[in-house]
Amino acid sequence: MVALPSTVPVSSGAALATRLAFFGAGFTMAAWAPLIPFAKARLGASDAELGLLLLCLGIGSIIAMPITGYVSAQKGARGMVLLGGVGLVVLLPAMMLAQSGLVLGALLFLFGASLGTIDVAMNVHGAEVERRAARPMMSGFHAMWSVGGIAGAGSMTAALTLGLTPFVAALMGALVAAMALLFAAPRLLRAQAPVSAPAFVLPRGIVLLIATLTAIVFLVEGAILDWGALLNLERGLLSKEQAGLGFLLFSITMTAGRLAGDRLVARVGAFRTLFWGGMIVLAGLALLVAGPGVVLAMSGYLLVGLGAANLVPVLFSAAGRQTVMPPGLAIAAVTTTGYAGILLGPALIGFASQASSLASAFWGLVVLMMAIVLTASRIARV
């Protein structure tokens, strides 16, 4: 991160700006989820074709992440937060006008690059705000991502249910994110002095295990975001306009879990948080895939959000404690590898769905999540 003089206190405005950046990014990404079935129907794309399109989003984000980390170290995070935010605001409604798979793929690539840019930059900015404030703040920042997710998925689902066209609904969502960005811009910290830092370091040893587990958790989150609405349609649970309800419920319990997460981990410890969190996610996935009726299926989304809420924070804490790699490099490697799960993983869900069914692909997530339960004690010993 760009170093700021230790004698200059961080302002409350900088903390507010960070929260707004997290909110805007979470809002925009979640707003995309209920729009996916409309984009798919507009192009007449198959599950495999949609998987390829979503792969474009993941590739764009993964390419942008290490570049953003390097630029933020040299020039400061402020400019990259704004660049990524503007990209999200412009591209969300633009994607709903795409007339071909090629155009949508290009827009998704840019959307993913914008998401990767603001994601890394706002975490770098948040880490500096937290350091300067000399008190824990990152959980609150990430909770604002979840709050944005609830607002984005909820408002988009409501707009579509009320009969707004996908483009108009997306435009309204983009305006909300733009307002958050405009309010945050003058309050973001400015660069003072460049710091030399590598863009990315490959994880090794226990860090490789932590990165793999993080990728699995993010893969589950990405599957809920990108495929949850389509799974609800495939099972005949909800109409197309209401299919995003599952992600909304998931976001609500994840937010509640994150807000209470620091106290929970301090009370029950890392092992119980990972083990029982993983078990709750497994139960939730089983319900949303096979639970009879809408109520039980929607309860599955609630359980997945609750169980997954504190898995990644515990894994990131373990990455900071391990001694195989310097903590800063380990966290950077886990972040990029983990986000590969949420951005590239959903494309694999599409291929698996094409080969069998979307429900079968989600059962595959159940198998992967077993790794969290089976390795909980190993991570807790770090």
Image (tube, rainbow, N blue to C red):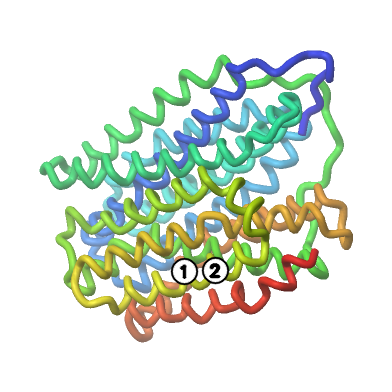
Q: Is residue 145 above or below residue 370?
A: above
Q: Which amino acid does label 1 sit on?
A: Ile
Check if mark 1's residue and mark 2's residue have beta carbons within 8 Å.
yes
The answer to which image quadrant residue 124 occupies is top right
Q: Position of residue 365 (x, y in %)?
A: 47, 75
Please state the horizontal and vertical placement of residue 262, each as a whole percent of the image: 61, 46
Nearest to the observer: residue 55 or residue 228: 228
Q: Name the outermost residue toward the front.
A: 267
Instruction: Report the disc number at residue 280.
Output: 1
Q: In which image quadrant can residue 52 be found?
A: bottom left
For mark 2, what is the residue? 276
User: Type of residue at label 2?
Assistant: Trp
Q: Quadrant of the N terminus?
A: top right
Disc 2 crowd, CA 10 A, few/some/many (<14, 14-19, 20+): some
Residue located at (78% from left, 52% from top): 320
> Is disc 1 placed on a helix, strand or loop?
helix
In 3D space, how far apart are the residues under numbered discs 1 and 2 (Cα atoms)? 6 Å
Residue 269: x and y in percent read: 67, 59
Q: In which quarter of the image is the C terminus?
A: bottom right
Of helix, strand and loop, which one carries label 2? helix
Q: Is residue 215 left or right of 166 when viewed as pictured?
A: right
Please report the residue visible at 40 percent of the width from the left and 23 percent of the height from the top: 179
In percent of width and height, residue 243 lies at 23, 58
Residue 271 located left or right of residue 147: right
What residue do we see at 56% from left, 15% from top?
186
Give whichever of 314, 334 is nearer the camera: 314
Is 361 placed above or below 31 here? below
Front residue of 64 and 186: 186
